[in-house]
Amino acid sequence: MYKFLKLTLLSLIGIFLLAAPSLCKENKLSSKTKTMLIDKLKTESLVVYSDNNQIKTYSQHGLIPLLIYLENNNFENAYAFDKTVGRAAAYLYAYGKAKYVYADTISKPAIEILKHNDIKYEAKHIVNEIQNKDKTDLCPFEKLTKNAADPAQAYGLIYKKIHPDTAIVYYTPDITPNSLVDIYKTLGKNLAGNVAVKVHSGEPGGHNFLQPDFMKPLVEYVNGTIVECNTAYAGRRDTTKEHKEVIKEHGFDKIAKVDIMDEDGEMGLPVANGKQIKVNYVGSHLKNYDSMLVLSHFKGHQMGGFGGALKNMSIGIASSHGKAYIHGAGEPEKIWTCEQDKFLEAMADADKSVMDYMKGNITFINVMSKMSVDCDCNNNPTPPEIADIGILASDDPVALDQACIDLVYNSADPGKASLIKRIESKHGIHTVEAAAQLGVGVRKYKLIRI
């Protein structure tokens, strides 16, 4: 009986190992191969050995080789051999899901990052910090990433430093209250003072707008006040009294303070070099806020083609009269008859005025869910046809909206056709084009998944 049990146990172990070959991958690199790869660091700055026995070598200095590799690969099934690994490089390896890193020289902060992210490492020399070329101070990238919240944020900081003409847009496919907070943290934006959280309160009858319970943890995290302005069209949100009733019905007052910013009138923001308007009329309470989080539901729009950060910042922050002023490109009486591109350019003008007024104390999050071709101001929106995509965040509203549009176009979901048709039928991209021309932001971006 003992022999039988012993043989059975050995057989089961054998079957288990055959069924789980990944358990053996950690030790597949022979001492001879490892020595050969380490030797290559005499002439190369980075050597990557993958499971299919491919060897990639890079001779560029600094972090450039890592960034090049990460453009189209990760380190999940590879062994990295690096000449120098400091804090910044360690964050990049963590972002690339490395399993093993060898370094000729490694810093103590880098070791802590690798350990925290369960990355095995070996090193020839350990130093306190990676210094600059003159040995007079820390390496600039070590300084840059010293207070990074996570590997994705560090990647964004590094990429932006090397590519200053490119905006950073963070992305997660997870649409949950927790992921909303996480992506805000990854932005690394410390919204201080009295924080306004600009949302869309949703026209009664509609049901696609972002729900209070979804945004509650984020609003609480930034200690924000939910802000809105009255509409320019007839409905249940065109007066402060009725708008407050809608806000109560939809439950926004249960999660935070709510402020109708044009309850006491409006104020004019100058538009520098505006294409269509020279002043943007916004809710007068805007002056009460030190910083702003523009939290937008990305979807189609029956007039603008799409609604995202740029629309929420322009039409959304405008007073009731200001909304008509933008829609009519300076002539409120033409709210429904204005030439389309003039209206879109007026929105971009309004965006410019708000960005200038906030002086950098503003950031943006777009949620790509329930993407009907109709706006949340529609009380009977067309059911969404395209599947949810995720949450995106950036300090650049132009890049953010551009990234959302690109994700729609690049989606494998055939349901995207109706949303694309809506965007194109209203020449929606022109708002992005005009905002970029005005310097509101840039269209070139790097999408970093968190």
Image (spheres, grey):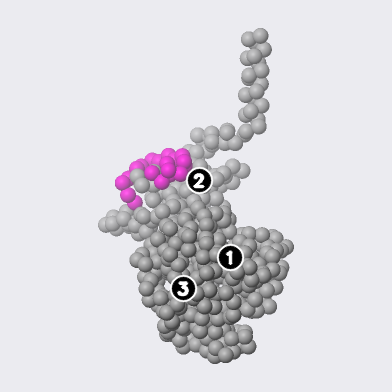
| Secondary structure found at label 2 | loop
> Which residue is nearer to you in this view: 45 or 314?
314
Q: Earlier in the sequence, mark 3 or mark 1?
A: 1
> Image check: 127 left or right of 159?
left
**Residue at numbered disc 2:** 98
| Secondary structure found at label 1 | loop
> Image check: 410 left or right of 227?
right
Is residue 117 located in the magenta-colored stretch of the structure? yes
Is residue 71 located in the magenta-colored stretch of the structure? no
**Residue at numbered disc 1:** 209
What's the CA distance linking mark 1 and mark 2?
39 Å
> Image check: 423 left or right of 441?
right
Q: Is residue 401 visible?
A: no
Residue at screen point 71% across, 68% down:
417
**Residue at numbered disc 3:** 260
How far from the left and from the top, in percent, is residue 347?
53, 80
Amino acid found under the numbered disc labelled 1:
Phe
> Which residue is nearer to you in this view: 101 or 157?
157
Displayed quadrant of residue 434: bottom right
Q: Which residues are magenta?
A: 112-130
In the rendered view, would you say 180 is above or below 122? below
Amino acid found under the numbered disc labelled 3:
Ile
Residue at screen point 36% across, 54% down:
146
In the rendered view, would you say 420 is above or below 57? below
What's the CA distance linking mark 3 and mark 1?
18 Å
